[in-house]
Image (spheres, helix red, strand yellow):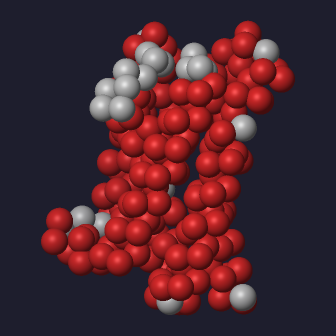
Amino acid sequence: MKSFVESFLPLFVAIDAIGTLPIFLALTSRYEPAERRRLALHATATALFIALLILFAGQLLFALLGITVNDLRVGGGLVLLVLSISSLLFPEVVRRPPEGADGEGTSFGIVPLGIPLIMGPAAITSVLVSRQSFGYLPTLASLALNMALVYLVFASGPFVQRFVGRSVSSAAAKVFSLFLAAISVAMIRAGIEGMLAAR
């Protein structure tokens, strides 16, 4: 139990589902509740798949591709930066309704919601550290619980929007898109600093 708790807490903080909820709401503010829940499911399933891949083959995968966590920070930060700018300036493009099982809605749930919003560099690093420190079983259990919590938090988004109202939600979406831009710049900066420190 101690290993599970010590594995769960860093990953919970790294994923930060509650802190990510406003960004999720901002990116999906014009989606219908059912579509938003479907995107939440796709996003959490994608994040879980990436986490399992990192858990069992992360170091090998990084070595084969010749990349590091700092590369992921910069790449993920660039993706989020482009998305946040598009959300601020061209919301009608970013927030188009999903097109179906193989349409843009599904890919939007995968990138950027699944990765790097949920399973970002910090979460990936937490998975690697947890496996090395506590082993596979506690890490798997903490992953399962964290992903369940992420889905529950994201699925509650429609109730949050209904409570605050669409006009307030639309205004908040702009604010959180700006915060998302700041977060993406911080990710890029951390990645570049990590690269320079590794030299």
Q: Residue 182, relative to residue 103: is it above or below?
A: below
Residue 109 in percent (x, y) is at 44, 38
Taking the spot 51% from the left edge, 62% from the top edge, the residue there is 122
Nearest to the observer: residue 71 or residue 124: 124
Residue 119 as seen in the image, left or right of residue 163 = left
Quarter location, residue 182: top right
Residue 183 in percent (x, y) is at 54, 42
Taking the spot 51% from the left edge, 50% from the top edge, the residue there is 44
Quarter location, residue 128: bottom left
Q: Residue 176, relative to residue 11: is it above or below?
A: above
Q: Quadrant of the C terminus?
A: bottom left
Residue 15 in percent (x, y) is at 59, 57
Residue 178 in percent (x, y) is at 58, 27
Question: Can residue 131 be seen in this snapshot?
Answer: yes
Q: Residue 70, relative to residue 185: is it above or below?
A: below
Nearest to the observer: residue 191 or residue 147: 147
Residue 174 as seen in the image, left or right of residue 137 = right
